[in-house]
Amino acid sequence: MTSTSTGGDNAVLEARTPLKTRLHHAWRPFRESSRISRGLIFSGLGIIAAFIALAFIGPLVYPYGGTQYRAETSPGEFTTFPELAPPSAEHWFGTTKDQFDVLARIIDGATLAFAVMALAVSIAMVVGVTLGLFSGYRGGRLDRIMVTAMDAVYAFPPLVLAIIVSFVLAAYLSPGVPSAAAAVGLVYIPQYFRVVRNHTLSVKEEPFVEAARSFGARNRTVLGRYVFFNVVQTVPVILTLNAADAILVLASLGFLGYGVQPPTPEWGYDISQAVNDVAAGIWWTALWPGLAIVLLVMALTLVGEGLNDVINPLLRARGKAGRKIKAMPMARRRDRSQRRSDAAEQDGEGLAVKVRDLRVGYRTASGPLWAVDGVSFDIKRGETVALVGESGCGKSSMGRAMLRLMPPGGVVHGQVDVDGTDVVTAPGSEVRKLRGEGVSLMFQEPMTRLNPLERVSDHFVEMIRTHKPKTAREQARALARDALVQVGIPPTRIDNYPHEFSGGMRQRVMLALSIVLTPRLIVADEPTTALDVIVESQILSLLERLRAEENVGILFITHNLGVVAEACDRVAVMYAGKIVEMGPVDEIFTNPKHPYTRGLVASTISLNTTELRSIGGYPPNLIDPPKGCRFAARCPHVMDHCTDTPPELTEVGPDQRAACFLYPGAGQPVPEGVVAPSGDPQVSGI
Amino acid sequence: MKAGSLGRYIAQRLLLAIPMVFILLTLLFLLLNAAPGDPVTATLGGRLPPEEIAQRKEALGLNDPLYVQYFNYMGNALTGDFGNPITDPRSVVQIVLDTAPATIELAIAAMLVAILLGITVGALSGRLRDTPFDVGGRLFGILIYAAPVFWTGLLAQLYFSVELGWLPSQQRAGGFDAPDPITGFYVLDSIITGDMAALGTVLSHLVLPAVTLGLLLGGVFIRLVRVNMLQTLRSDYVEAARARGLREHVVLFRHAFKTALIPIITIMGLQFAMLIGNAVLTEHTFTWPGLAQALVGFIGARDYAAVQGIVTFIALVIVGVSLLIDIFTGLVDPRVRY
C-alpha cells in the first residue's frame, strides 16, 4: 500500500551505544521533519489516546453496559429503556431498536475493537516474522515456494479472505474475539513476511556479517540483530496501517454478519442493525458507530502516514524545517531593460557571466546555512574556469545557483549576469528561457539524469521546441543528430531509450543536450567523475573544442586537479563557501599563495611525488561559521589576528588573487618577520 | 526496439503465472477443506433424509480420499468447471455469467471516479507539498479511506434518496426499466438497443454505488499518486529537465507524473483485490445483484461447494489481472522488457 524503504545498514553496529544517544538519534528525523508531518502524528496520537480512554475507562465510568436494556431504579425495580429514543439527557447518543444505549455500545465496541486489533496484529506479526526469518534463512526452493504463496495470499481480496477464514473457523470456535482476530490477522501475515524475509536474505550477503563471523561472532546473533534493527524501522508504519485496516475489516465482517456473536456490541454489526432505521429517518443509530470507526481509523492512518513521512528518507521533506530565508526581491522592469542595454554596450568585453557577491542559503532546522557566501568572479567567452575545493565546500550549490535551480528552502542572493539578464532577480519565465539556451548545466551522475521513459530524441525535440517554438519536428531532430555526431554518438541511435546506453554514452548525450542550443555558458558539475579515463578525456576535448570554436564560457566544477591542469585557463579555489584564491592555471599549480591552495596542490599525487601530504582537520560548520578566516583552524601559518576578521581577496601576482593575511591588502597589516610561502608546494612544502 | 523482446517478456510473465495459480488454488482447497464434516451435511443436514445425503455425497465425490478430491478440483478448475452449488440448481459458471456483468459494470464506473479523483488531487498534492491544498487533499484521502464503504453508502442513501429523493437507493434497474439483456451490461445494452429511457434509469441506479465505491478507492489513489509524485519530483531527471529550461507543466506531466504512474499501475493489481473486497460491501449495502452479493448469499447458506467455486473463479481473475498489469507495465516502461 504505502511504499516503505529501509535506510540504515549502520543500525547493527549501534547495538552497544548508550540508550540516551540512541534515543537522540531516533528523535532526529522528527526534529528535521516538517511541522505538518509532526502535526499529523500528534493529532493522530491524541485521538487514539482519547479512544483508549473511552475503551478502558469508559466502561467504569458510564452507568450502562452495551447489552443492557433496562436500569435498576430502586432495588428490585427495573425500568426498561425506550426503543429508538433520540439523544437525550439519559441516553446521550439515543437508543437502538433493541432498547440498547448507543453510547454504551460505542464504548464496549471500542474495547472489543482494541482487543481484536491488538490480537490480530500480534498474530500477523509473530507468524509473519517467524516465517520470514525461516524462509530467508533457509533460502532455496522452499523460500521460492513460500514467497509465491505469500504473494498469492497478498493478492487475494483481504475481506473475502477474512470472510472465508471466519467461515471455516466457525466450525471449530464459537464466534468471538479470538476467531475474529485470527480471521483479520491472517490477512496481514504476508507484509511482515516480506519485510523480514528480504532483510534476512540480504544480510547473508552483507560484507560486515562476513566480518563479524570471522571475528567469531555467532551467526544467528549477528543475523538476528541486523534484521531486528532494520525491521524496527519499517514495522511501526506497517503496524499502525494494519491496525487501522484491522478495524475496518472487523467492522466489515460485523456488517456482513460474520463477526462476533450478536448482540455483542461491535460497530459494524451495529451499523447493519441500523440499516432499516436510516430509511425511517432515524439517524443516531447508524451515525455514531460509523463516526467512531472513521475517527479511530483516521487517527491510526495519520500516525502511520506521518511516521512514513518521517522515517522514509525518500519522503522526508527538504527545506521545511527551521526559519525561512527571505528571497531577493524581483527586479523592476525598468532596471532590467537598463541593465540589458548596458550589457549590449559592454558586449565588447565578451563576458559569458558576471557573478557579484553571490550567496546561496539553505533553510535548516538549526538555522540558515550559507553554502556559498559572497563570491564574485567573471568568466569571459571562450574561457574555461575551474572551480575546485573539497566536497561540501559549496561548488555544486554555486553551479545550481548560476541557473537559480534551487531545491525547496534554497535561496540565491547577489547577482549573476548572463547576457544582460540577472538570473537572481529576473522573473521565473525569463530564467526558464535562459536555462538550456543561455546557460547549460551538465550533471555529475549521467545514469539518472535522463528520463527513463523518453527516447533520446524526445529529450532533444522537447527542449529545442521549448526554446525555439517555430522549429519543425524534423528540423529539431536534425539539430539533435548534429549534436550527437559532435559528441561521437552515431545519429542512428537517436530513437534509443536511455537505458540502452552505457554511462559514458549517457554523459555524452547529456553533453549533446547542453550544447545543442549553443549557450553562452556551460556549467559542468563534475561531469567526468563517474567515468573512466578514456571517456573522460573524450569529454574534455569536446568541451575544449566548444570553447575554442563556439566561444562558449565554461565553469568546470571538479575536485580532480589533474583534469584542471589539462583543461582549464583559470582556477578558482573554494573553501567553506568562499573563494580563497583565484588565478591562471600555471600559477595555481607552480606558485599557489593561499595555504589552503598549497595544501590542496601538495596533496595531489604525481609521478614526482616523494612524500604524501594532506591537510589535517575538517572544514567548519557553515551554520555557525568562524568569525575570521575560515581556514584558520587548519592553517599551518595561522596568526593571532586570523581569527578576528575575514581576509579579503587581494592582488598577489599578475591576475592572481588570494584571501590571506600573509599578503598585504587582505585587510590587516602583515606582521614583521612573517614570510609567505612560495614555489611549488610539492617541493617547498605548504 | 527489438520486436521480439515484448513477446518474450509476455511469455515469461505467463510462465510465472502458472505456479501462482497452482499455489493459490492449493491454498484455497486446503483452507476450505480444513473444516470438519462435509458440505452436504453442513448445508442440508437435518433437512433431508440421511440416505439422500449419502447419495448426494457420493455424487459429489465427497467420499473419495482427499487427494483424489484435490486432483479433481484442480483439474476441473483449470478446465473452467467450478462445480455445482448445493443450494442452487445453476452451475457456478452459470451463476458467474449471470451476476458478473453487474459487478464489472459497478467496478468500471467506480474505477473511473477513483482515477479521476485520485490522479488530479494526488498529483496536485504532490506538487503543492505542505500547502493548504496538499494538507486538505491528504486529509480528504485519509478520511475517505477511514470511512467504511457501507457507512458512507448508508449516509448517501439517507441524503440523496430518502432526504432529497433524487436517486434510487437500492438494486440495479429492474423489471420493465431494465434494457433487453444482450451482454448483461445494462449501460451497454441500453445503448445498443437505443433505449434512452432505460439508459437514464440504469445510470441513476449506478450513480450512488459507483460514487461510494469510487470515492473510497479514490482516497487510496490520492495517497499513492501523491507519494509517487513526491519521489519523482525530487529525482535527478526532473531537475535535469528543469535545467534544460522546460516549462513547469511539461516538467510536471511529461517527466514527473508519467514516471510516477508506473509504480501506481503496478500497485493497481493490489488495488484490484481491495476493489473486490469493497465491492462485496457496496453490493450488500445497495443490494446490487452482483457476483459478490451472490458469494455473500452462499456463505450465509453455508454452501461450501458454491463458495469454493466462486472463490476459485475470483482467484483466477486476480492472477489474470496481475498478468495484464505486468504486460501493460511492459508496454509503458521500456526498461521492464529487458
Image: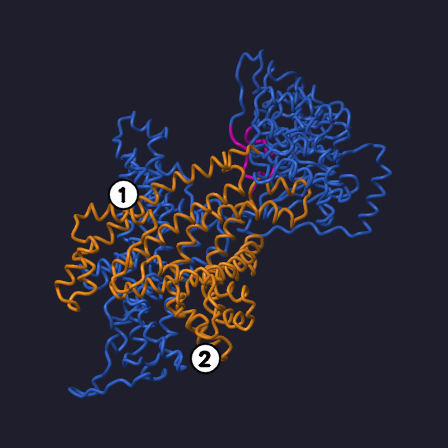
Residue A150: x and y in percent read: 32, 45
- Residue A623: within the magenta? yes
- Residue A139 lies, in percent from the top left, at 30, 34
Specify start and end residues of the magenta stretch as a single range. A617-634
Local packing at callout 2 (Cα closer than 10 Å; few below 14, some 14-19, many 20+) is: some
| Mark 1 lies on residue | A131
| Residue B191 is inside the magenta segment | no
Chain B, which colour?
orange
Mark 2 — residue? Answer: B162
- Helix, strand or loop for disc 2: helix
Please give left or right for residue B148 compared with residue B197 in the image. left
Image coordinates of residue A349 in percent, x first then y, are 83, 32
Q: Taking A6 as reference, is A293 above or below it?
A: below
> In front here: A666 or B290?
B290
Q: Nearer the viewer, residue B17 or A661?
A: B17
Q: Does the magenta stretch mainly form a helix, a strand or a loop?
A: loop
Residue type highlighted by circle 2: Val
Letter of the blue chain:
A
- Asked if residue A211 is positioned above or below residue A646 in the image, the reply reads above
Would you say residue B143 is visible in this rendering? no
Q: Label 1: few (<14), some or many (≥20) within 10 Å? A: many
Q: Is residue B39 left or right of residue B183?
A: left
Rounded to the nearest whole Å, what is the CA distance between mark 2 and mark 1?
Answer: 51 Å
Q: Are marks 2 and 1 on the same chain?
A: no
Judging depth in this view, the residue of A595 and A90 nearest the camera is A90
